[in-house]
Amino acid sequence: MEIVSIFAKQSILMTKSKLITDMNIKKLIPLIVLYLGVITSGCTNNDSTTTDITISDAQIKSFKLLKNDSVISGLEEIVFSIDQYNNYIYNSDSLPFGTLLKEKLLAEITFNSASEAKILTVNNDTTIYSSSDSIDFSSPVNILVTAHDKKTTKEYTVKVNIHQVDPDSMTWVKSDFEIPKGYSILTSTIIGSDIYCIAKNENGINSLFSISTNNFIGWVNNGDTNIEGEVSQLIYYNDFFWAIADSRGLYRSNNGINWIQINNSVESILGTIDDELVYVENGDRSIVSTKDFISFKRRKISTDFPSHGFGSTKYYNGVERLIIIGGNKSSLEPTNSVYQIYLANNDIIVSGDIHSKNGSWKARGGITAQYYNEKIYIFSGNNGNIYYDEIYTSINGGVNWVLSTEKSLIPESYGKRSYANAHLDEKNAIWFIGGNNNQTSYNDIWKAQINKLK
């Protein structure tokens, strides 16, 4: 009986084990089927998505030109942008002015998924794109891409941009706005982006005009001033307007309308150095500098130093300097002298004439000067009835000069004139105001700018 009982127990245990095993298998089978279904579904979905993209995608993925030093060095480094929305391929950094695409160029183009790409030229020539075939990019080229589905297409325009203006050339533009007729003898200064100009009307009254170089909508007449005579110089310094009027000396104003005389023996304003006002004073004929009209520095000068009609501009070469160029002596004789003035050891240092012996340009008054593009520029001027329309430049503080040709020329429509005002604005443009010759007193305004500084 015990033996039978043992076997019976073993049989029962085996039956339970089999039932448990069968139950586990039954549970695992749905899980395995589900897992295989997920894998199969995932593979199917991926295949389907990839197939759809492959079939209908006609986009260009990348574009570049290959090396061709006979056209321009570094051609292969030019970056081309692809505007997928407007179907436009271009180089935002244009090739240098004067570049000639005289040869066909090889292009490396990659696609997301395309069966074919056709090159369409302006001459209606059509070729199948191949990386080994060169393309004429001297005019815009269209590329028609066909996707793998042979139905979806996308047409791109490719343009190789080249600078159309010489970056080193100076462009001159005349404004439509002028000081009203009936006013003459324009004298101006610039404060930030605003130009202020004093002009005398037919009744001998000086009025103050202003115009913004940022919002160029015309001159504003700010009213009549109380300054009398011919205003020959106007600057803005230390929150005040400063002017020279006839032989009446130096005047100051906080608004350009109401003026008071500061010194009746000042002959001319030379400019500012290290935040000091610098001018020529009569009597013992000295160059004087001051910040406050309480303490002064003085340096006596000869009668050869110009009285008026000179060009004045700042120049920095270790120390800040004023460069005084040409002009007329006290005897009214024109000169082609150049002087450097700077402050050192609580004193005014005035160089001797550093130019007239070289004679790069002829003696003249009414010179317009401006430090610009790391050079000193002088414009125009006159010697008696001879008026000039020349530009000279100096890179060494006025010692040596070069006549500007081709790239920087005064336009014929500007004319030959002297005593024009020149002001450099905050955007690297020079504004020329007025001027005159023996026939015309100009009321116009011109903007001149070197293209690469725009």
Image (spheres, grey):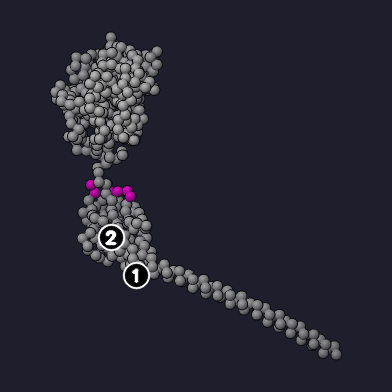
| Residue beneath disc 1 | 151
Left/right of residue 413 with respect to residue 397 in the rendered view: left
Q: Please tell me whether mark 2 sits on a helix, a strand or a loop.
A: strand
| Quarter of the image with the C terminus in it | top left
Mark 2, Cα crowd under 10 Å, few <14 / some 14-19 / many 20+, is many
Residue 397 placed where, x, y %? 28, 27
Q: Is residue 98 magenta-colored?
A: yes
At x 45% / y 69%, what residue is drawn? 49
Q: Is residue 117 above or below residue 64?
A: below
**Magenta-highlighted residues:** 92-99
Residue 416 placed where, x, y %? 17, 29
At x 17% / y 34%, what residue is drawn? 412
At x 26% / y 27%, what residue is drawn? 421
- In front here: 315 or 289? 289
Left/right of residue 317 with respect to residue 101 in the rendered view: right
Q: Is residue 153 above or below residue 96?
A: below
| Residue beneath disc 2 | 142
Residue 129 figure quarter: bottom left
Kindly identify the amino acid type of the residue bearing the numbered disc 1: Lys
Residue 20 placed where, x, y %? 71, 80
Mark 1, Cα crowd under 10 Å, few <14 / some 14-19 / many 20+, is few
